[in-house]
Image (tube, coloured by chain):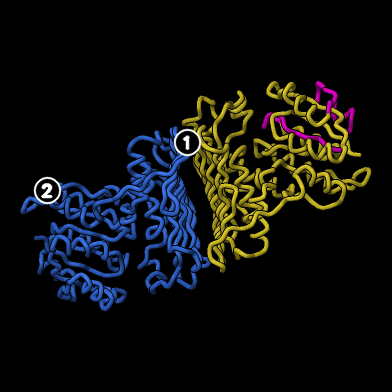
Chain colours: A yellow, B blue
Amino acid sequence: MLNVVQIGSVGHYAYALTTMRKYKLSFVGVCYPHEADNRVRAERNFARFGFEPPVYDDWREMLETLKPDIAIVNTVMAYNCEIARTALSMGISVFCEKPLATTLSELATLEETYAISQARIPEGGRRPVLCAMFGIDYLPHFETAYRYVKSGALGDIRLANAQKSYRMGNREAFYSDRAEYGGTIPWVAIHAIEWVIRIGGLRPVSVSACASTACNAGNGTMEASTLCLFACEGGRMASVSADVMRPATAPTHDDDRLRLVGSRGILEVRGGRVYVIDGGGEHELTLAETETELFEEMVMEMLGRGTCRVSAEDAFLATRAALTARDAADGGAPLVIV
Amino acid sequence: MLNVVQIGSVGHYAYALTTMRKYKLSFVGVCYPHEADNRVRAERNFARFGFEPPVYDDWREMLETLKPDIAIVNTVMAYNCEIARTALSMGISVFCEKPLATTLSELATLEETYAISQARIPEGGRRPVLCAMFGIDYLPHFETAYRYVKSGALGDIRLANAQKSYRMGNREAFYSDRAEYGGTIPWVAIHAIEWVIRIGGLRPVSVSACASTACNAGNGTMEASTLCLFACEGGRMASVSADVMRPATAPTHDDDRLRLVGSRGILEVRGGRVYVIDGGGEHELTLAETETELFEEMVMEMLGRGTCRVSAEDAFLATRAALTARDAADGGAPLVIV
């Protein structure tokens, strides 16, 4: 069936392992291009699922030699874009860590490569799929919010407030280096930006943002607190607050929130639950069961049996909005999202 | 004892009635300068507290004739500033509806008049007091938050998210007219801005903002959704979300929230309760009892027995930040708060 390789092990590759076993995909090669890609830990995780992929020193050589169907791309943030672009240009489907790039110019080259890959009919008849690791969308509370919004129950959504709050924990060295890390807005806030876009249905057109490295526990240029204000199409608007200042004593690692204010009601995701106020008053929604996992959905799309809920287009827009927001924070002036 | 007059009856003058009765202040005159100042309703409210103040046609004449100690100023938003300024210039203390002005230039004249009133030693030895109607600060949950923050338990507060959400309800005609109303940011968001300043201790230095009249139930130029991003001193930051889109079916009129992210913990006011995560893990604070009411505190300050918890300076800064935010939203570009 499908052959899979993995490049890097810094990110959320574990999303793929269950599906790879379930569908008996062949794990034909792995490469650890960055010193932060912890081979020992990755191999321990692979072994739990019965995988023992051969190790390659050079990811390009691995792609050219093996010509896999799928490349799982999740080394350090700054290097994923080039790898994803190379794979796509070879017609290989890519399961890629977010952000899809750490600079807007790199992102543009990836978008161009993706567009080309979709425009031509490839050998074997299968266009490559690009799926970004927005796995949080698959949690029951976000899927529940998505379905409720798409039912039209909130009417016209005018205002969104989204939040990510993480514990700092111990961060590896590359988080301290903007050139490798990309920043907290593209790494953390991007999830909340993606909810605003995909769940809220808002289209950001410009952004003002603030970010600060204060209280970052010695992690170099890593921002510990960030805030973005997105002006969206049709006079709509969204705030995205993302911090890495959640106390170590907090009961959970993260505190994900989304509040959507519509013409017919208000929805709020908080603490893994979904609350709405609509024509029926204030009530809590029963959580949806999500049958399909992220990587599984990608495989299904490749097999022509459905589509990933987070499209490549949404992933591009979320990445573009996040990178523009980071640049706006850096420059201290609002920027248009082009 | 102290003589009190009231000008206008659109706002929160009711804050004063209990204290006026408790301290046996003399309610010596009232004036209804705007057609929206509902005399019948006001007189019904006064009567409940045993007051039947004489009615004057002209507020200037009333101030000059009666030379009261206190003027309660709460006619339609756009006219309060001139009245407050006139009273202060006569050495009369002012209990004024927020915002203190609806334009930055008007606000500047009020600040100047106030500064002059404080600089000279007045006849009778009593400097006039200016107290703005930020009554929400007196609610137990906000007082609890204030005391907790001032204890230092949150450490250095780097990030604030504040929210006002109101039901639209039936709004009188002047809400439809920007020239009279001033806007939803100065009228509604200003409370959340004031919490950020006074409770959070942040000092806003510039602001980006969005506002939209969509879904305003036919209320002319009244904004139904607004968002502000404040860059604050020392690289700190605050978002303020204010909307008038809370469904009529909601269990309460308002949904006030404040989240403060500090170097040592996170505090959140929500649903009239106060939650913190600090060194002791996640817990809820016991609500403080607030002994003194807003107007009572003003009277005490006039008698030299304490100070209002919301100082004139904080009220000026909150108004300046709100008006600047509104202007930033109007102009579609960030503005420095001067």
| SS of the residue under disc 2 | loop
Q: Amino acid at mark 1?
A: Gly
Residue under label 1: B281
Residue under label 2: B120
Q: Amino acid at mark 2?
A: Arg
**What residue appears at the point 58 percent right and 48 percent down from the top-left corner?**
A336
- Label 1 in the same subunit as label 2: yes
Chain containing the residue with disc 2: B
| SS of the residue under disc 1 | strand
| Left or right: A321 in relation to B305 | right
Q: Position of residue B83 (x, y in %)?
A: 22, 64
The residue closer to the viewer here, A141 or B114, is A141
- Residue B330: tell me if it is visible: no
Chain containing the residue with disc 1: B
| Left or right: B304 in relation to B35 | left
- The quadrant in which the N terminus of chain B is found is bottom left
Q: In the rendered image of this protein, does residue A228 appear above or below residue B252? A: above
Segment colored magenta: A51-79
Rendered image quadrant of residue B266: top left
- Residue A296: tell me if it is visible: yes
- Please name which of the two marks, 1 or 2, marks the residue nearer to the observer: 1
| Left or right: B323 in relation to A314 | left
Q: Earlier in the sequence, mark 1 or mark 2?
A: 2
**What residue appears at the point 62 percent right and 54 percent down from the top-left corner?**
A203
Instruction: Rate crowding at label 1 as few (under 14), some (14 to 19) or many (20 or more) other CA atoms within 10 Å.
Output: few
